[in-house]
Image (spheres, grey):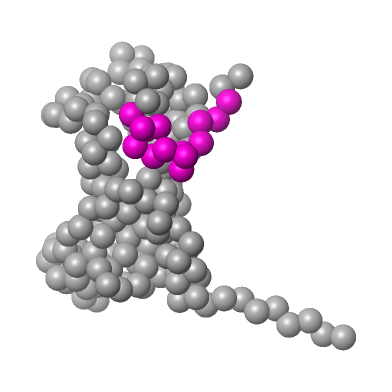
Amino acid sequence: MTHTVVIPSAQQRAEKILAEERELYRHVVRTRVRTYDVDRQGIVHNAVYFYWLEAARVEYFRAIGLPIDRETFVTKHRFVVAHQEIDYFVTAQFDDEYEVYTRISLVRRSSLVFEQLVVLVEGPLLVKASAVLVHLNPATNAPERIPDSYRTLIAEYEGDRVVFANEA
């Protein structure tokens, strides 16, 4: 007896992700692909998505009520990326309009887990990504517990869509 393994196509996986996960996201940033985002092939270079994701995370912090200015991530709220994962599904081209959906799904003692989707407006999923950001003490650069004030802002914004891990 032979068994057939059916592996879903990238398109099927992308459609399933959008159908099951998009409703989990409250925060959305909409913009367009700029000329400097595309490479010689006429598509968005794979590294550019990381800039889009970073910009959306900054806007997420602003949306939840974290004051943002020039010193925010230097001396006040030191978060550094410790890990990132990204899955690419479809390419984007110059002038395509896209949205970056951003959420925090998990808060640990000193780290946050961001989940993000990049979707063409009225189109398919381009990218699914996740990132772990670690909160550092600005003076020592050592990991530091995420303050209760940040935890409150995240909880108020995300509601029951975020998990706060046991710190014990």
The residue at the far top in this view is 139
Quadrant (top left, top right, bottom left, bottom right) of the C terminus = top right
User: Is residue 30 something that shows in the picture?
Assistant: yes
Query: In the image, is residue 105 above or below residue 91?
Result: above
Give the residue drawn at x 26%, y 47%.
Answer: 56
User: Is residue 39 something that shows in the picture?
Assistant: no
Quadrant (top left, top right, bottom left, bottom right) of the N terminus = bottom right
Q: Quadrant of residue 42?
A: bottom left
Give the side of residue 160 with respect to residue 68, left or right: right
- The answer to which of 114 and 45 lies nearer the viewer is 114
Query: In the image, is residue 57 above or below residue 89?
Result: above
Give the residue drawn at x 26%, y 60%.
Answer: 99
Magenta region, main secondary structure: helix
Give the residue drawn at x 45%, y 76%.
Answer: 11
Residue 113 rendering spot, x and y as whole percentages: 45, 40
Q: Which residues are magenta?
A: 153-166
Is residue 159 in the magenta section? Answer: yes
Query: In the image, is residue 22 above or below residue 147?
Result: below
